[in-house]
Image (cartoon, rainbow, N blue to C red):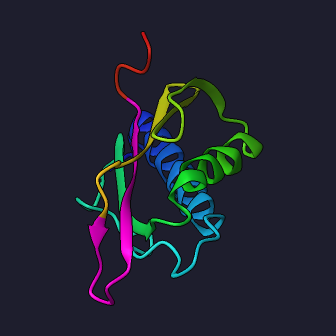
């Protein structure tokens, strides 16, 4: 049984992007950290990855920028920035959307939180 080279390439790209996204999340230096711990929802596949978590409302204004800056150091190109709420970055056939919700949420500890979402997709990227 032979391994499909295309599937192997996709898997390698996916693992690279996944690692870079998790590293970018580690750069979100906010009180309480990225409360989702970079967990994938759903678990992801070769062409899609979704990370979701919560950041302190005090730090939310720069949390999206911190993730985007970390990705740019890995060679991602900033395509669009929508103030503090949205960034679109691209590299090769992949696009990454980094968004932060405006509506504050109340955490279990009573602190105000914002949701930070990172969505990567390798299908139909900007074409």
Q: Is residue 77 magenta?
A: no
Quarter-of-image position of residue 110: bottom left
Q: Residue furthest bottom?
A: 109
In the picture shown, does residue 121 fall above or below 110?
above
Residue 43 at x, y percent in the picture: 27, 62
Check the image and name the residue furthest to the left.
Answer: 42
Horizontal side of 125 relative to 71 (left or right) equals left
Report which quarter residue 27 is drawn in.
Answer: bottom right
Write the residue at 35% across / 61% down: 52
> Residue 66: x and y, percent?
65, 53
How many marks the image carries: the answer is 0
For the point 42% across and 9% down, the residue is 127
Q: Nearer the viewer, residue 83 or 5?
A: 83
Q: Name the spot of residue 44 as percent of width and height, x first.
A: 30, 54
Is residue 73 toward the left or the right of residue 89 in the image?
right
Q: Within the image, what quadrant is residue 57 found in?
A: bottom left
Front-most of residues 41 and 103: 103
Q: Which residues fall within the magenta stretch? A: 105-122
Q: Of residues 103 and 36, which is closer to you in this image?
A: 103
Instruction: Give me the residue at 47% from left, 31% from top.
Output: 95
Position of residue 72 relative to residue 39, above or below, is above
Q: Is residue 43 above or below residue 5?
A: below
Secondary structure mostly seen in magenta is strand
Q: Is residue 13 left or right of residue 105?
A: right
In the rendered image, the residue lying farthest to the top is 127
Q: Position of residue 101 (x, y in %)?
A: 34, 49
Q: Taking 45 as reference, is 30 above or below it? A: below
């Amino acid at each position: 049984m032979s391994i499909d080279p295309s599937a192997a390439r996709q898997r390698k790209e996916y693992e690279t992007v996944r690692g870079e996204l998790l590293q970018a999340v580690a750069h979100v230096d906010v009180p309480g950290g990225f409360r989702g711990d970079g967990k994938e929802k759903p678990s992801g596949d070769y062409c899609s990855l979704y990370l979701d978590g919560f950041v302190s409302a005090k730090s939310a204004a720069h949390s999206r920028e911190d993730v985007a800056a970390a990705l740019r150091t890995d060679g991602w190109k900033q395509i669009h920035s929508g103030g503090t709420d949205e960034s679109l970055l691209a590299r090769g056939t992949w696009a990454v959307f980094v968004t932060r919700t405006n509506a504050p949420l109340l955490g279990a500890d009573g602190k105000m939180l914002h949701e930070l979402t990172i969505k990567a997709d390798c299908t139909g990227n900007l074409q």
